[in-house]
Image (cartoon, grey):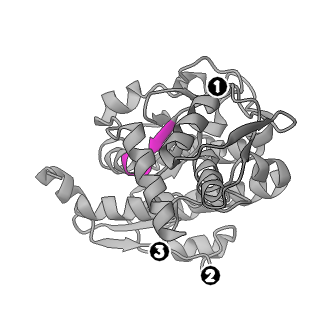
Amino acid sequence: MNLTNSSNSFWSGKKVVVTGGAGFLGTHLVSKLKEHGATDIFVPRFEEFDLREKEACAKAVQGAHIVIHLAANVGGIGYNRDFPGTLFYDNLLMGVHMIEESRKAGVEKFVGIGTICAYPKFAPVPFKEDDLWNGYPEETNAPYGLAKKMMLVQSTAYRSQYGFNAIFLLPVNLYGPGDNFSEKSSHVIPALIKKFVEAKTDNKPNVTVWGDGTATREFCYVDDAAEGIVLATEKYDKSEPVNIGAGFEISIKDLVEKIRSLVGYEGEIVWDTTKPNGQPRRMLDTTRAKQEFGYSASTDFDIGLKKTIEWYAAHN
């Protein structure tokens, strides 16, 4: 990748703290930061830094110039349905403490990573940032989405009162190599890949999928999202939230057929309509990201899916 001198000079002499930097998005982000010229990157690990605790957050941000807060307790529809209280509590505390301790530590810039789950259940598609407060989120993931959205409220308040430079980004559902394939907490793409690969390996006659397939989703390749976060960190300094996505919409039914074809599974698909669909439609308007810091996703969806399937097959 050819990077401008200005990109590299932005990171010169800056200590960057990336919470969640050992996770799925975090590992890709750390690699992308190094590509852009960051050399002093600190990743606080949960074993030593429980970011639900104020003291741990204060310790994590000590001496930092830039904090990128990715850390989250997060999962798919089933996980959100089973642990709404835990997800609200954990994510709210992490965001509140990280922003406050960053402000107290004199951090130059705080980058909060939110979620598409913060949007109203029936927001007009594509979701525009200005619609973020025009309704309640989809009930299944509302506790998680609202807890993360409080970072936007806090960052705006802190910019107003303290002049604290905090920005808030809203990534769409991510996928790619290194994703979470846990049966209990994975999102839709890794969950489907796991199901179809195992069904093909074990010669299972059918695969059961939640819902009826009518819901739509947008997916962004993890490297593209990481690039968007780096660009925003370098170039964006406003209080308005910004979407990070790929700008397309696909139904779960079409996604299932696409993954089945790429895996090469020939059995039957059974739709379990007793299980929730989640939000009816999801797709982000990414105009603001393009205008403000020149971001647009570049990875073809089929190519990204193939890379993800290949990674799963190689590692499992």
Residue 44 visible in rendering: yes
Task: Report which quarter residue 253 is drawn in.
Answer: top right
Q: Is residue 218 above or below residue 285?
A: below
Q: Residue 286 versus residue 173: which sits nearer the camera? A: 173
Residue corresponding to mark 3: 62
Return the mark for residue 281.
1
Image location of residue 252, percent across then percent down: 63, 32
Give the labeled residue for mark 2: 47
- Residue kind at label 1, given as amino acid type: Arg
**Label 3 is placed on what type of residue?**
Gln
Q: Residues within 10 Å of mark 1 (few under 14, many from 20)?
A: many
Looking at the image, residue 210 sits to the left or right of residue 172; the answer is: right
Q: Nearer the viewer, mark 3 or mark 1?
A: 1
Is 274 placed left or right of 187 in the picture? right
Judged left or right of residue 206, residue 264 is: left
Q: Verify CB contact (< 8 Å) between mark 3 and mark 2.
A: no
Q: Secondary structure at mark 2?
A: loop
